Image (cartoon, grey):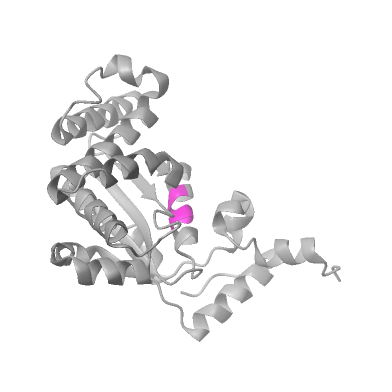
Amino acid sequence: MPNFDDATIEKLFGADDAENERSERFKEYFYYNHAYESLVSDLPVRVLVGHKGVGKSALLKRAYLSDIDRDIKCIWIRPDALLSIQTSASADNQFIKLIETWKRGILVQIINNFFGDNASQIAPELNTAKAADLVKLVIKSINTDANTIGTTSDSVVNIYIDDIDRGWSASADAIKNISALLNAIRDIGGLESRIRIRIGLRSDVYFLVRTSDESTDKIERNVIWLRWSNDQVLRVMAKRIATFFHLNTDQMK
């Protein structure tokens, strides 16, 4: 019988947040639900919406780890990497320019991830290029990698954005900023379906944005609502206990 101290309880039920959980243990006890299946579907835009603490980050992290395991090109963009984009976007009051700032900012982050310190040498026009040209550069990189590792030319890159609503103030500017971001990822998906963006948002943030900007109705079909029934919560707990004790059980979805 294990000693149920704090360390053992954390090993059994996991960390408070998915980001700080060890990847191998996290993959062992992760519970696959219908929201996860929708998140990883072959669509360019997926917006995962749910209340704080219901597991949005966990689903995004599991999809990201699955991409790594299957050698699918993927990028996890952290909030601090988007700070400069938010700052630039906040300085512009014109909504169309706000959307363009987000589009360019996200695409530049992708390119920087691909090329690292060589990005400015490979693409000297990085800071002035239009979003459509940046998309072409991303696709060129995907195709180059596909030829190198022997995958097909329809290879994709999955972009994960989480915690974008950290420090959410519900101000008019904050609502406008998130609305511009949602429009931006929709535009990127429209330009190139092989650049697939998955983003997590708190439900209160989404509701405010949705009711403040009618243009977000065009992204509603890409929204995945993360909800848990009592039965699913019990199954989550059961799977964590079973994997902790190394019991050979199959998950029932």
Q: Is residue 52 above or below residue 105?
A: below
Q: Position of residue 127 (x, y in %)?
A: 25, 26
Q: Is residue 45 above or below residue 73?
A: below
Residue 229 is left or right of residue 150, and the answer is: right
Which residue is rendered at x = 30% and y = 49% of the image? 197
Asked if the stretch drawn in magenta spans residue 51, the answer is no
Q: Is residue 148 above or below residue 81?
A: above
- Give 208 or 67, whichever is nearer the viewer: 208
Which residue is rendered at x = 38% and y = 50% of the image? 161
Magenta extent: 60-64
Which residue is rendered at x = 15% and y = 51% of the image? 95
Q: Position of residue 233 (x, y in %)?
A: 54, 79
Q: Residue furthest bottom?
A: 230
Q: Is residue 78 visible?
A: no
Q: Is residue 37 visible?
A: yes
- Give 37 or 95, whichever is nearer the viewer: 95
Q: How many marks?
A: 0
- Give 152 or 145, whichever is nearer the viewer: 145
Residue 240 is left or right of residue 87, and the answer is: right
Q: Position of residue 91 (x, y in %)?
A: 26, 43
